[in-house]
Every structure is written in structure tokens, then in C-alpha cells.
């Protein structure tokens, strides 16, 4: 599991104006909470935090104003430019168990005439806070219609347990839908019939105009 060290400073200014000022200095407003402690308001380097958050469930070792281990709990980004606006971090301790959403990725291609229907792109699991799994991969190469994987079928990393029912469907392979094309005669008749209907609808209007 990835562990990233990021420096921190205490923050004593609040509100939208203060937040904008912090972001202009390439910092991000952060709130650290958990374990019954009072929330602590910090600022952290925006670039370092952005890079760290590219890894799912990254463990952040906060240094400087506080020295703690934390996991991302909530991230707010600018909807257009994508920069970090605010981040919530939750305290963790070595040895404690936490529930996270673990990414589920797929490799390979199913057979021709079938399509993959992935119900879950992430799944809830429980693991030690300092040994969180990066994800689980499912190989579907050459799988045919009827193939299915439930949560209980997943090959979970060591020390990780499911936080959902084992029979929860993760993905299955289904038949590709077929499209029935009209026969040649039917395709030719349809435009002619539509033209006749339009002509008939237009006759009263033409008579009225005369």
C-alpha cells in the first residue's frame, strides 16, 4: 500500500475569502478529524496532495503542524478546472480495521456475441488501516455467456475481508442484443406508405386554400 508524507500547517482563517487566498498560494484547506478528537484545520501543499489522491485509499502521513496517519474521506474539486478546493481526512491508527471501497478492475475480452455487464466498479471491504489493498482484478478473457463473478468469488488480498454479502453480483457475461432488420420488400414499402399518408393529410389544407 502507498504511504505518502505531506507537510501541514495550522489554519486559523476560515470562510470563502480565506479559502481562495489559501488556494492562490498553491495550498489546500484540509480538515482532520476522527477518534473522538476535535477537528483540526490545516493547509497542505496542493500539488503534493493532488498527486497523492491519484492513488485510491492512499495512506497519508501528515507531518509538521500535526504528526498523524490519515485516509482521504471527502474531496471537493473545482468542477471545471479540477483543482482541489477542500479535503477531509480521517485519523487512523496502526492495527485498526477500516472499511473502504476497493477498486474492481477487469482484464481481457469476452467472446464474440457476448458483452460484459459489470455491476460494481468498487466493492466494500475491511482491512487494516495501514495495509489497505490497492484493488482486485478479474480476468474475463474468453469468457462466454453465463459467466458470473460474485463478491465471494473474488481473490481478495491477504488480510482483507468482505464488507458485503458474498452473493453480491460483481459482473456477468450476457448475450449481445440482436437487431432485426426489415426485409427488402418491407423497407421499400415503408417510405411509399409514409408519402401517401402525408399527401392525404395535405389535401384538406390545399382545398381550404383554394
Image (cartoon, rainbow, N blue to C red):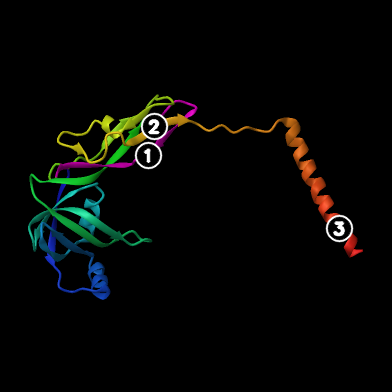
The residue wearing badge 3 is 204
The residue range painted magenta reads 109-128
Vertical placement of residue 33 versus 120, above or below: below
Q: Quadrant of residue 107?
A: top left
31 with respect to 188 (left or right): left
Secondary structure beneath label 3: helix
The front one of 80 and 104 is: 104
Indicate which disc residue 172 carries. Answer: 2
152 with respect to 61 (left or right): right
The residue wearing badge 1 is 119
Vertical placement of residue 94 versus 157, above or below: below
- Mark-to-mark CA distance, 1 and 3: 55 Å
- As drawn, the residue found furthest toward the right would be 210
- Residue 119 is covered by the magenta coloring: yes
> Mark 3 vs mark 2: which is more N-terminal?
2
Q: Are marks 2 and 1 in contact (CB under 8 Å)?
A: yes
The front one of 3 and 104 is: 104
Q: Residue at x 81, y 53 (%)?
A: 201
- Residue 187 is covered by the magenta coloring: no
Q: Quadrant of residue 32?
A: bottom left
Amino acid at each position: 500500500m502507498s504511504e505518502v508524507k505531506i507537510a501541514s500547517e495550522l489554519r486559523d482563517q476560515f470562510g470563502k475569502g480565506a479559502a481562495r487566498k489559501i488556494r492562490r498560494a498553491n495550498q489546500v484547506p484540509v480538515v482532520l478529524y476522527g477518534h473522538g478528537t476535535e477537528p483540526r484545520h490545516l493547509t497542505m501543499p496542493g500539488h503534493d496532495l493532488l498527486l497523492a489522491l491519484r492513488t485510491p485509499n492512499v495512506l497519508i502521513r501528515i507531518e509538521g503542524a500535526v504528526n498523524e496517519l490519515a485516509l482521504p474521506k471527502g474531496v471537493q474539486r473545482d468542477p471545471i478546472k479540477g483543482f482541489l478546493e477542500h479535503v477531509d481526512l480521517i485519523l487512523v491508527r496502526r492495527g485498526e480495521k477500516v472499511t473502504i471501497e476497493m477498486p474492481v478492475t477487469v482484464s481481457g475480452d469476452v467472446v464474440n456475441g457476448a458483452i460484459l455487464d459489470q455491476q460494481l466498479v468498487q466493492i466494500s471491504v475491511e482491512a487494516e488501516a495501514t495495509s489497505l489493498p490497492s484493488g482486485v482484478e478479474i480476468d474475463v478473457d474468453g469468457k462466454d455467456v453465463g459467466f458470473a463473478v460474485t463478491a465471494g468469488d473474488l481473490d481478495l488480498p491477504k488480510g482483507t475481508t468482505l464488507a458485503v454479502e458474498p452473493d453480491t453480483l460483481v459482473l456477468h457475461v450476457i448475450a449481445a442484443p440482436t437487431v432485426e432488420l426489415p426485409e427488402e420488400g418491407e423497407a421499400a414499402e415503408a417510405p411509399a406508405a409514409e408519402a401517401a399518408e402525408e399527401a392525404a393529410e395535405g389535401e384538406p389544407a390545399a382545398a381550404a386554400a383554394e
